[in-house]
Image (cartoon, rainbow, N blue to C red):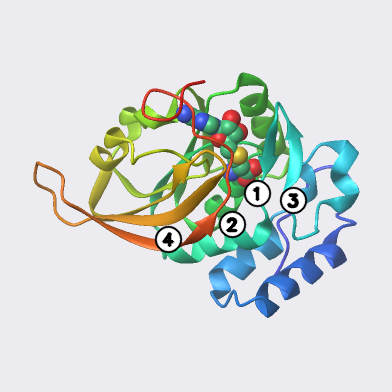
Amino acid sequence: MAPRRLTGSPDTFGGYRARLVEGLRASGIRDLAVLKAFAETPRHLFVPPAVRHRAYEDAALPIGNGQTISQPFTQARYLEALELKGKERVLEIGTGSGYQAALLGAMADTVFSVERVEALALAAQRALREAGVTNVSVLLGDGTLGWSAYAPYDAILVTAGGPEVPPPLVEQLVAHGRLLIPLGARGSQTLTLVERVGPGSPLEVRHTPLGTARFVPLLGEHGFDA
Ligand code: SAH
């Protein structure tokens, strides 16, 4: 597994990254494409300098503006559940640091990621550039409305917890596409797989609960009040 080439200084974090990947494997992550994405993606470029020394711990870390970069194990579970094959166009809601978008970029064809906080969107764009990721676009706006210009998407990942599945996201998903979203109250959700069963209207979906999750709130028109 050749690490993605980093611009600027040589990658001195390679050993820590390998240990993170081993930890994920030991915790039960089996999908080789997921493990490879973690092995190739320099998480240290996506966290603020103050917590960079902790970049390869399997822990959520603060990224500013009251937001967090999720725990790698949780992100790995998400990526396994999406069952990406490499050719997909993916929509992510909640860019945050940009790290999960970079992982998605390593596993799919094209990624569009929507963030509502401008400072985070800009920092994520910078980190993606620095990491040499070229197939991820960051969009500024309310992700509960999706991003219709590039729809439909083969897979949609929501990385903040919402009270309901935002209807525009289902509309922007291909027939038989997979959408993952933590659903529930602020502070405690159930990670839910939503599959679009058919192309017709009304939109037919199947919900499968995948376990408990704790994400920052999804804010916006089809989310919680800001
Ligand atoms: N995937 C991120 C973690 C994101 S934390 C990572 O790898 O770092 C959740 C993010 O969702 C936060 O940055 C928050 O600002 C954003 N968010 C919350 N509601 C949103 C909305 N309606 N549209 C877009 N982003 C939203």
Q: CA distance from mark 2 to mark 4?
A: 11 Å
- Residue 43: assigned label: 3
Closest to the observer, 119 or 134: 119
> Label 2, on which residue?
75
Q: Is the distance from the Cβ of mark 2 to the nearest ligand 1 atom less than 8 Å?
A: yes
Residue 44 image position (x, y, % from top left): 80, 48
- Crowd tier of the residue under label 1, counting other residues whose Cα lies within 10 Å: few below 14, some 14–19, many 20 or above: many
Report the image quarter containing ligand 1. top right
Q: Is the distance from the Cβ of mark 1 to the nearest ligand 1 atom less than 8 Å?
A: yes
Residue 50 image position (x, y, % from top left): 89, 37
> Label 4, on which residue?
82
Instruction: Determine whether label 1 and label 2 are within 8 Å by CB.
Output: yes
Observer-side mark, 3 or 2, equals 2
> Label 1, on which residue?
70
- Crowd tier of the residue under label 2, counting other residues whose Cα lies within 10 Å: few below 14, some 14–19, many 20 or above: some
Question: Is residue 84 among the parts visible in the rendering?
Answer: no
When asked about the image quadrant of residue 51, the answer is top right
The local secondary structure at tag 1 comes to loop
The local secondary structure at tag 3 comes to helix
The mark that comes first in sequence, 2 or 4, is 2
The mark that comes first in sequence, 3 or 2, is 3
